[in-house]
Image (cartoon, rainbow, N blue to C red):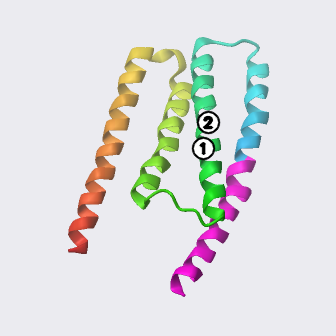
Amino acid sequence: MEKNILRTQFGTMMRRLWLGITWPSAILTLIFGPWMWYLLGSFPQWLMIKLVFVIGLYAYHFSLHVIYKQQMKGIFKYSSQHLRIWNEVATIFLVAIVMLAVVKQNVSVVWGLIGLIAFVILLTSAIKIYKIVRQKNKS
């Protein structure tokens, strides 16, 4: 009984988030991204690299759409840990995209990649530490 109530509530929350925030944001990105390119009048190297990350973010977005559709049908293939980790993939993409937009030519690609890899290691370590702390608190 309680499980059904929670699933109904989570379904409502997922639908609102997906249709009210996620899809409109993706569409606005498709509008404002090319507009920015047009305003720049050129296609600098940092923008090409950023575009690769944005394409990766859209691939991630469509993978989430598959998970969303499955969960709306009541199919739950992934554990909360898997979904928690998958949730952080967007953070990695967004940090890379913002970093490229802010620093542009001021940081070399090598240092940018080193920083991004360090961020990924820090993020995955934080997820593992959080899991260990949760398990200790359950005992």
The residue depicted at 58 percent of the width and 31 percent of the height is: 56
Q: Is residue 89 above or below residue 18?
A: above
What is the magenta segment's predominant secondary structure? Answer: helix
Would residue 102 be counted in the magenta stretch?
A: no
Q: Quadrant of the C terminus?
A: bottom left
Mark 2: secondary structure: helix
Quarter of the rendering containing residue 129:
bottom left
Magenta span = 1-24
Q: How far across and down, in percent of the image, does residue 40 sit?
A: 73, 18
Please name the amino acid that badge 1 sits on. Answer: Ser
The residue depicted at 71 percent of the width and 46 percent of the height is: 25
Give the left or right position of residue 59, taking residue 123 as reference: right
Could you classify mark 2 by the number of other residues whose Cα lies within 10 Å: few (under 14), some (14-19), or many (20 or more)? few
The residue depicted at 68 percent of the width and 56 percent of the height is: 18
Q: How far across and down, in percent of the image, does residue 102 sit?
A: 54, 28
Quarter of the rendering containing residue 29:
top right
Please, which residue is most extreme toward the bottom here?
1
Mark 1: secondary structure: helix
Q: How far across and down, in percent of the image, does residue 35 sit?
A: 79, 27
Give the left or right position of residue 9, taking residue 136 as reference: right
Please name the amino acid that badge 2 sits on. Answer: Ala
Q: Do the residues labelled 2 and 1 touch (CB within 8 Å)?
A: yes
Q: How far across and down, in percent of the image, does residue 57 sit?
A: 59, 36
Could you classify mark 1 by the number of other residues whose Cα lies within 10 Å: few (under 14), some (14-19), or many (20 or more)? few
Q: Looking at the rendered structure, which numbered label has been put on residue 59?
A: 2
Q: Name the residue under label 1.
A: 63
Q: Is residue 26 above or below residue 33?
A: below
Q: Which of 96 and 74 is in front in this view?
A: 74
